[in-house]
Image (cartoon, rainbow, N blue to C red):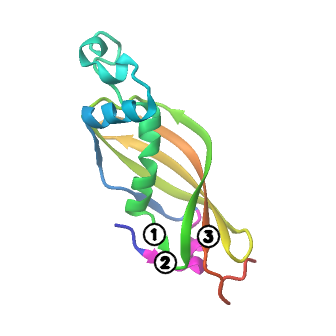
């Protein structure tokens, strides 16, 4: 579980700290549930027999499933500002799905704070370099630049400057 920090300490973390989440399992059941939730039932995700005859050798997780795990991975390891009232997903830059995640593998997130800046007294933008590693694989499942916003409680320490 992530620790708590002050908003005032966040700028000191830019480029200086890397956080790594716990390993998360990606079993076939999770892949099937994601297929149902998104109506993406391509055989490479849900049909182990047909997928065995592909270069993947079996079913693989949807790239967007892997991407969607970032929120839980982030919550698992990146410190939370005590003054935060909510976090907002603002989007991604340069998302790349480098290596497929085979059903049954474990993945974890690696986060580096690239930029943090105030957007007024109640909002801060945070930009993270992110990668999702696959256990026992050399290349990551994905890399991305993640843009987030954090609403904060205004007080005399959060001047927005």
What residue would you read off at disc 2? 5
**Which mark is first along the chain, 1 or 3?**
1
Q: Which mark is residue 151?
A: 3
Q: Nearer the viewer, residue 63 or 109?
A: 63
The Cα–Cα distance between marks 1 and 2, rounded to whole angstroms, is 6 Å
Residue 77 in which image quadrant: bottom left
Q: Is residue 61 left or right of residue 130?
A: left
> What is the magenta range?
4-14
Residue drawn at x 61%, y 70% is: 151
- Asked whether residue 6 is in view, the answer is yes
In space, the residues marked 3 and 1 are separated at their CA atoms by 15 Å
Residue 106 on image: x %, y %: 28, 41
User: For residue 87, what is the image quadrant?
Assistant: bottom right
Q: Which residue is mark 1?
A: 79
- Coordinates of residue 150 in the picture (x, y in percent): 60, 66
Residue at the image point whose x is 43% and y is 25% from the top: 40
Mark 1 vs mark 2: which is more N-terminal?
Answer: 2
In the image, residue 138 above or below residue 122: above
The one nearer the camera, 149 or 10, is 149
Query: Toward which corner of the image does residue 34 lie, by quadrant?
Result: top left
Mark 2 secondary-structure assignment: strand
Q: Are marks 1 and 2 in contact (CB under 8 Å)?
A: yes
Q: CA distance from mark 3 to mark 2?
A: 15 Å
């Amino acid at each position: 579980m992530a620790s708590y920090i002050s908003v005032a300490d966040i700028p000191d973390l830019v480029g200086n700290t890397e956080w790594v989440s716990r390993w998360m399992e990606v079993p076939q059941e999770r892949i099937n549930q994601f297929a149902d939730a998104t109506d993406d039932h391509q055989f490479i995700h849900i049909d182990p027999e047909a997928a065995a005859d592909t270069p993947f050798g079996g079913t693989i997780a949807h790239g967007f499933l892997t991407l969607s795990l970032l929120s839980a991975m982030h919550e698992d390891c990146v410190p939370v500002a005590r003054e935060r009232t909510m976090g907002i997903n603002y989007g991604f830059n340069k998302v790349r799905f480098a290596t497929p995640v085979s059903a049954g593998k474990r993945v974890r997130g690696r986060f580096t704070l690239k930029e943090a800046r105030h957007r007024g007294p109640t909002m801060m933008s945070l930009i993270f370099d992110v990668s999702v590693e696959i256990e026992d694989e050399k290349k990551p499942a994905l890399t991305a630049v993640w843009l987030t916003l954090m609403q904060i409680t205004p007080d005399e320490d959060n001047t927005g400057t």
